[in-house]
Image (cartoon, grey):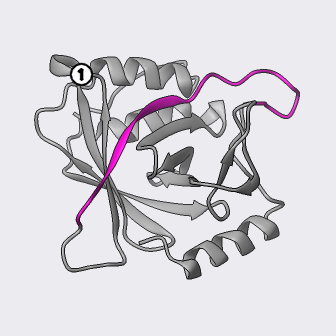
Amino acid sequence: MITRRSALIALAGAALSGGACATDQSPDGDSIPTPLSFGVARLLSGSDADVLALLASYGEGNNQTKFVIEFQNESHGVFRHVPGSHPARFFEELGKTLMANARRLSDERQETLPFDTVFLGPPTIRSPGGGYGGAPGDWYTTKLFLGQDQSEVYFNFNLASGEGEFSTKDEDYGNAVLSELSKVIW
């Protein structure tokens, strides 16, 4: 569960790292592709009140993609496979968002995919320009680290509105993030 303690730890981490935060502008002022938005709903996680589990869904009907994102503590989590998902359109759009130039999905199939995470500060607002910060709000901004090479992607979510999104950290990670996520979203 996202607790006051975890928010304080994340705030301290963001301050120490220079206040990094997911935005829609690159350092040289170029536009970054639009984040890939999808729905999120909180799941009951059984007896462990410290686990935050979110069911993510993208698309509708026969084109709907579903997966679970589970934050097990302030720095670790897992993606969980959801049977019956149809991710072709999801990966097409995610590849664009991540600026993946060699879109290759993994042949490996896993029920879970662990990740490391950093919360980039306390819940905040979404700025009109698409970035985050400036005042308290309902958006949690996180950076996820996937695979052995620790490929990075931003995952931002708003429990009040039921929205989640992936956005690019760096185009150099796009292919690896796409491949890692395809191991569990299939």
**What is the quadrant of residue 171 in the picture?**
top right
Q: Is residue 8 left or right of residue 49?
A: right
Can residue 100 be seen by looking at this rendering?
no
Q: Dividing the image into 4 quarters, which one contains the N terminus? A: bottom left
Q: Nearer the viewer, residue 119 or 150?
A: 119
Please tell me whether residue 108 is drawn above or below residue 52 in the rendered image.
above
Q: Is residue 55 above or below residue 93?
A: below
Residue 28: x and y in percent read 88, 28
The residue under the point 23% across, 25% down is 64
Give neighbour class at mark 1: few <14, some 14-19, many 20+ (Cα, 10 Å). few
Query: Looking at the picture, which amino acid does disc 1 mark?
Result: Glu
User: What residue is shown at x 17% (from left), y 20% (from top)?
Assistant: 61
Chain part drawn in magenta: 25-44
Query: Is residue 40 among the parts visible in the rendering?
Result: yes
The residue identified by callout 1 is 60
Q: Is residue 73 left or right of residue 66?
A: right
- Pick whichever, 9 or 157, lies toward us: 157
Q: Is residue 33 magenta?
A: yes
Q: Position of residue 6 (x, y in %)?
A: 56, 76
Residue at figure coordinates x 78%, y 30% from the top left: 25
In the image, taking residue 175 as reference, residue 19 lies left or right, namely right
Mark 1, secondary structure of its residue: loop
List x then y, in percent, for residue 133.
Answer: 74, 51
Left or right: 38 in relation to 141:
left
What secondary structure is the magenta-colored segment mainly?
Answer: loop
**Circle count:** 1
Q: Is residue 154 above or below residue 61?
A: below
| Residue 102 coordinates in the image, percent (x, y) | 49, 19
